[in-house]
Amino acid sequence: MAISASRDAGLIRKESSSRAWSRGVSVARGVPKTSCSRFSTKIAMPGIVRRVTTAERSSIACKATAATVEKSTKQSQQKKSEYEIFTLTTWLFKLEKEGTISNELAVVVSSIALACKQIASLVNRAGISNLTGVAGAQNVQGEDQKKLDVVSNEVFKNCLSTCGRTGVLASEEEDLPVAVDITDAYSGNYIVCFDPLDGSSNIDAGISVGSIWGVYEPSEQCPMDAHDDPNKLVEQCVVNVCQPGKDLACAGYCLYSSSTILVLSVGTGVYGFTLDPTIGEFVLTHKDVKIPDKGKIYSFNEGNMDLWDKGVQDYITSLKNPEKWDGKPYSARYIGSLVGDFHRTLLYGGIYGYPGDKKNKNGKLRLLYECAPMSFLAEQAGGLGSTGTTRILDIVPDAVHQRVPMFVGSKREVEYLESFTKNK
Ligand code: AHG
Ligand code: MN
Ligand code: MN
C-alpha cells in the first residue's frame, strides 16, 4: 500500500507537474508529500494505478499552488544558482537603479575598469612584450618614466576620453590637466584624476603595481564651457581639478598582483572586485570592506628615518619597543608600491606612512591622485587619512601635482601617530 500510494502520488505529481510547467507555473516541483497525501490515498486503491480526473487535477493544482508558492519563493531566495555571479557591471546597474549614482558615473567607472583590464594584461606580459625599462623621458615632476608609465597613461586617457562622460583628465604623467574634446556631442562633465601606474619602479622585478583614480563632479564655480582661448580653457581645467578629497564622487585603485583586484567607493562603503580572467569580468569578492580598528603592521620607507621630524622618529621607535606592546613589537612591511601597501593595510589593519622629511617637506606622494583617493577609501572603510596634523580630505589643492605627507590606515593607529605629530 505504501509503495502503490507513493507511486501513485508520484504519478499525480508528475501529471500535474507537466501541466503546471506548460502553463509556466511551478506547481508540482517541490510539492511536499503531505500536501498531496489525502488525494493520493483516495486515488491509489490497492493494486490500482489510474490517472487523475480534470476536477481532481485542478483541486491538486490549487492546493499545490497554495502550498508551494511560499516555499518556492523561500527556496529561490535561499538557494543561489551555482552560476550566479555579481560583477562590477551588475553592481553599477544596481546603484544606478536605486539612485545612488548617476548613469554617467556608472559609465565613467566602467571605462576605468576597462583601462584596468587592459593594463593588467600589459603588466602581466611586460617581460614578454618588451615593456620593461625606461621610456627615455621624465615627467613634469622630474621622475624617469617607465615604458609602462607612458603606455598605461595612454590606456587611461583613451578609455576615459572616448566614454563620452568626462570633461577633464589629470594624470601624474601629464604636465597639465587636459580638456576632453568638449565640442563633441557626447563629451560629459566628470573630472578624473589618475596615477595610471603606481609603483612602477617595481615593474621590472614583477612585483605588485597598481592604478589609482579619483572622480569629481565639475566645480560649481567653474563650469566647463567651450572656449576659443586655450589659456582660459587650461585655467578652467585646473580649477575643476583642484577640489578637496571630501568632494570625491568616486575613488578607487586596481592592484595588479597575484590576482587583479579593483577596489572602489562611491561614498557608500568600500567594495572590491577580483578579475576573473576566464570571463574577463570583475566579480564582487570584497563586500563593504571595513578596515580593522587596530593593526600591528607599519609600512614606511625607514631608509629615510634620519630625515624625518622628531615626532615621526619617536613614533616609529615606540612601535619597535617590545616593552610597550606585551613583548611583541609591530611588524614592518613595505613593498614600495602604494597600492600594494595600502591594500594590505585595508585588509589586515595597520598604518601606511610617507612623511615629509628634511629634503622634501611634503614627502613624495601626490594629493590629487594618490593621497586623496586612498584617504577617501580609508574613511569609507572606517579608517583615517592624515598629514599628521590635518585631515587629508579637507585639503583644497593649490596645484595639480601638489604633494602632502600621508599617514593612512586603521583609525586607532593613525590617531596614535597623530599623538606624536599634532600640536608639536
Ligand atoms: P609612482 O610609481 O606612481 O611614481 O609612485 C611611487 C610611489 C608609491 O607607489 C610608493 O609608495 C612610493 O612611491 C615609494 O617611494 P620610495 O621608493 O621613496 O619608498
Ligand atoms: Mn604613484
Ligand atoms: Mn605612477
Image (spheres, grey):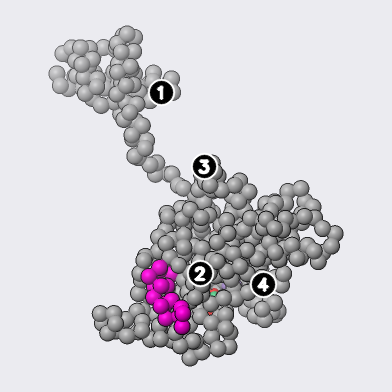
C-beta proximity under 8 Å, tags 2 and 1? no
- Identity of the amino acid at label 4? Ala
The answer to whether mark 4 and mark 2 are in CB contact below 8 A is no
Residue stretch rendered in magenta on the structure? 409-424
* Residue 124 included in the magenta stretch of the image: no
Residue at position x 57%, y 56% in the image = 249
Element under disc 4: loop
Question: Label 3 belongs to which residue?
Answer: 98
- Residue in the image at 49% along x and 72% along y: 386
Where does the image place residue 195, in percent across and percent down from the top left?
61, 68
Task: Report which residue position mark 1 lands on.
Answer: 25
Residue 119 makes an appearance in the image: no
Report, in whole angstroms, how far the alpha carbon at label 3 lies from the one at label 1: 30 Å
Residue 159 place in picture, x, y as percent: 66, 57
Which sits in the foreground, 152 or 204? 152
| Relative vertical location of residue 188 with respect to residue 119 in this rendering, above or below | above
